[in-house]
Amino acid sequence: MSDSKPIDIPVLALGPRGDDMTGRAILRQLEELLAALVERDEPGSIDLRSLPFGPEDRQLLEEALGEGEVEAEVESMGPSRVRETGIPGIWWVTHYGSDQQPLAELLEVTYCPEILITPSDAAKEGLSALRARLFESDHMGR
Amino acid sequence: MSEIVDNNPLDLTGTRISVQKPEVRYDVQGEMPDEERVRIAMRSFVKDFGAHSAIYMESCIHCGMCAEACHYYVQTGDPKYTPIWKLELFKQAYKREAGPFAFVYRLFDLKSAVTAQQLQQWQELIYDSCTMCGRCTMICPMGIDIAALVSQARHAMFEAGLVPHELWAVAERAEREGSPLGATASTFADRCEWMADEHEVEVPVDKERADVLVTISSIEIMKYPNTIADFAKVLNHMGVDWTFRTDGYEATNFGLLSGNAAWQKDMSMKMIKAAIACGAKTLILPECGHAYGALRWQGANLYGKPLPFEVLHISEYLARGIKEGKIRLRQWPESVTFHDPCQVSRRGGATAAPREVMRALGVKLTEMGEPGLNWCCGGGGGVVTIHRADELRYKTFELKMKQVEATKAEHLVSSCSNCRQTFDDGQAHFQWDKTMESLLEIVAANLINT
Amino acid sequence: MRDKTVLELLQARGVSRRGFLKFCATTASLLALPPSAAAAIAETLGKTRRPSVIWLSFQECTGCTESLTRAHLPTIESLIFDAISLDYHHTLQAASGSAAEAAREEAMKAAWGQYVLVVDGSIPLGEQGYYSAIAGVSNLEMLKETAAGAAAIINMGTCAAYGGIPQANPNPTGAVPVSAIIKDKPIVNVPGCPPIPVVMTSVVAHYLTFGAVPELDHLGRPKSFYGDTIHDRCYRRPFYDQGKFATSFDDEGARNGWCLYQLGCKGPTTYNACATVKWNDGTSFPIQSGHGCIGCSEPNFWDKGSFYQPLSAGIWGDRQATLGTAAVAGAAVGAVAAASTRIRQQHASEEK
Amino acid sequence: MDLIDFARGPALQWSLALFIFGIAWRLIGVLLLHRKVDHSLPRHQDTTMGGVRLIFSRMWPKPEFRQSNAVHYALSYTFHIGLFIVIFLFRPHMLFIRDLTGLSWPTLPSGFVYVIGAMTLATLVAMLVRRMSHPVLKMISNFDDYFSWAVTALPVATGLLAVSHLGARYETLLALHILSVCLLLVWFPFGKLMHATLFVISRGTTGALFERKGAST
């Protein structure tokens, strides 16, 4: 046992699958979802983790959707990255755990992802917090 | 029984010699209940069933390939002529009586459904449409020797009294008179004398002592008597101490062909005793197919120990004589094809000998396919004697004619007198221009006598 | 605290509304639910009262609890599960002795008919069940008693689900799984030795969220985690199809990361999420680390022959003796058959 | 005990025992039947070699017969070679035999074997259709022929279903696959599948007998 050498075990021996069929299917579905949003005001989303999604598919989607104007980072129970694609109304949302492992990856078709909107409860709490601060500064200022 | 014989005078004038066409056929012999007939047939089939036959019975995979090797199937397209099917009824007997699972079959009474009627129907398959030529053995992927099994089935058929009329009649005559075709000892002696005169050749008969005993086929005695002279010419040319013997001249064995093992033994023992009596070292068999199988390969086993002399087919004896320089031949540079008699070549192993003889004659030989594998003449196994089989036999003969014609050879040569009479008969029927010639005859005609 | 909703309790623990939404989205994804389910989860949890979970440990090795607590960082589902809902777990709780048992009884009384019972370990039936007892109460008795008031039972680990190692041959304690005793409650099996931590917490969270057991396979396992075989989801699968196999643990094939079928991998007949969810926060799983799957999430995995025997090999009893006897017996019967045929032939010959 | 454990365990063990029992019974039962001493003077002495020669030479059709049986030869070769590849050159199968006998050998890519398996099954179906329609085969066929066909086709079919996950869960299909092999093993000694062992003895017998006579083989 003393002369046993550590061996290197490759962990990702899988080659590329070699097609982007899933990517193409997703683009079709996005078209339907976006039409639903525009025509009926119905938001929708696609869970990328539930699909056989390879590097070719990702490349195809990234090229087809492009970069948009908005990019946001939400820090809550680990980071979440939210960015609008070059197609307005389609958002690319990736949730990470507190250990930076991706937990979920979604394409949301909506005017604004819910995670970006300030919840009304939080806004109420914000209002009282702000008032408390104003009160404080008024007193301190005198 | 004898009324069959009495009513069956021989026909020795036709192109094929047999009993005359019977007006009423007796294809069933003896009086016994149907069940008894079936029982006897089945018991007989397995009575001396050895390991070899049992292995064959176990091995068939029902692939049906043997059909394509059989001239009866090829010419008629009738599946009943599939060689292994000819044994179908006997398989039941084997399974129930001799197979490794036999006691299970008997225990659960998985009874054979064989009836006497079926056996009678099978008579045609076992006799009329099988020459035991053994081509099926050549094609069988399991190597089953179907021809040998048919021979065994014939034993059963004989014991059950289910032999075709003519075959039974000639076999019975052979047992009684010593020749199936009326070539009794005295007739034979007369013919020898006649030929000696006719050809001015010495024909020794019944010498006390001789190195070589020559035997002959009834067909030759009655239909091709010149053969007697040809034998004499060649053996005298070789300077051999030889003889014919009236107590053991008949080489044909209708006991074998009809399926009567006891008669087969009687017929073989005559020759064996004659050879021993004159102290022969060599017994020469004539140009006859089944005679070769009967004595060369079965003789010693009927005798019960190795024969005290060697048994050779005439073609083998000629080949040896040529090799030893005892036979000097003129060149006979003709275009020839050679018909291999099934029992001598394919099944007897004397395939090379006639070719060595022909090489010495300097003939231009064109083979009919692989030597030893050619189509049967269609007359072997006693089939040629059976009148009701004629039509079927002519059909199979067409196949043979085609094969011969394909060689474009001018001469058709063989070394079997039974094949020869089948060819003569076929020739007459189809008005064919080919006459089969005897190898012995050609050799006898081309000897260089100094 | 019992009157508050799950959302309120989470918020009290510093989870923001956004964090909660994120949790709902990831849970939906993990459970292979459509993205629209995230909203339903959020809505339910916003209204659902705090659930109660009672965890009973029977004939077990505490490996399942160890696995559970190996979740690296707190996640919302683990918060929902252990911080918010767990009322009794004798390994994890602070209380001990009679105080602990009192906590169990109190929790049962407070939420009779509504709590979730989680079980790890099998139940010994031998010696009237007293191979294993807690506070003088046999596992069998405690299970029956606690299960009576449960809304559903979740079996954590192969022991509770299928009997596991305690039940393995020769099963000295007469161990049985929960399902052998409790027949009248919905039961979810979360097998594995141990199960994957996130699978454990997610299944509990799913039940708490939806108030119903998830879709199960014929062995009572949630299809979302146990729907595919390890083999079908294995990253080494292409090597199986190409016929490239490691033939020992230190050969070229092993170094190249080829298929471990020949070394006894039970991946083809094992249903679990190891190949996709992986272990230690997604770091690896046994096959990735170079060892074949031992099939621990399947019933009787301990008794299915050697872990190093290829799946296609038979599971033999006393093979040599059986086959040797068969050969000798066959030869004897054959010899008798041949002899009887010979005798019959002899008779037949004499008859004539 | 679930189906797969039953299949891999007792079913396999007992069917293998019956397989061996049956083979021994049938072979010994035939080989111990009486053999007559052949007193005739042999043309050739080395009959054993003649037997060995025919065992191999009969694997290849004679030119004389090739044309008339072309369809049969084509189907038989495809089927036998296909079956050989599927049984012996698929790694899991080799491992099964290795477990049993300790012998091992190289195998082919599994994906390739699947294709061969499908081809073998197709050939089997073609052979069945032929058996049921060809006048000779139709007439000479019996229960053994059809049942042997079925127990041969079943393992191929269930094996293909198992690898393609069609119809049921993999372990169920695998169990059915193994059970179908058990059926084959049990039937083997008692039906015509036995030809896989008998061909050696049968051809060897004729080869030796004919070599003795110098007859054509």
Image (cartoon, coloured by chain):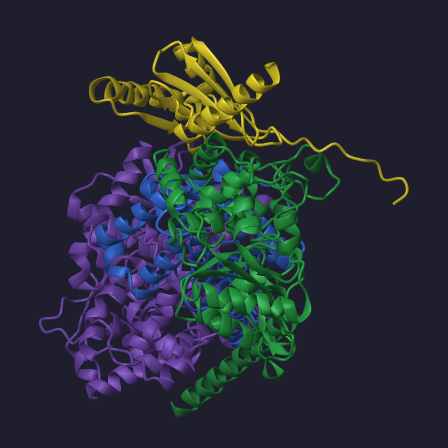
Rendering coords of residue B209 (x, y %): 56, 70
> Which quadrant does the C terminus of chain C fall into?
bottom left
Rendering coords of residue C149 (x, y %): 44, 69
The reply to whether residue B165 is visible in this rendering is: yes
* B150 or A126: nearer the viewer: A126
Task: Classify residue B266 by image quadrant.
Answer: bottom left
Task: Classify residue D62 by image quadrant.
Answer: top left
Chain letter for the green part: C
* D13 or D28: nearer the viewer: D13
Image-based side of B311 in relation to C135, left or right: left
Rendering coords of residue C161 (x, y %): 52, 62
Query: In the displayed structure, would residue B296 be above or below residue B108?
Result: above
Task: Classify residue D177 by image quadrant.
Answer: bottom left
* A137 or C311: nearer the viewer: A137
Query: In the displayed structure, would residue C192 be above or below residue C349?
Result: above
Query: In the displayed structure, would residue A42 be above or below residue C147?
Result: above
Q: What residue is at 60 percent from the left and 36 percent from the top?
A: C282
The hue of chain A in the figure is: yellow
Chain letter for the purple part: B
Rendering coords of residue D188 (x, y %): 45, 64
The reply to whether residue B305 is visible in this rendering is: no
The hue of chain D in the figure is: blue
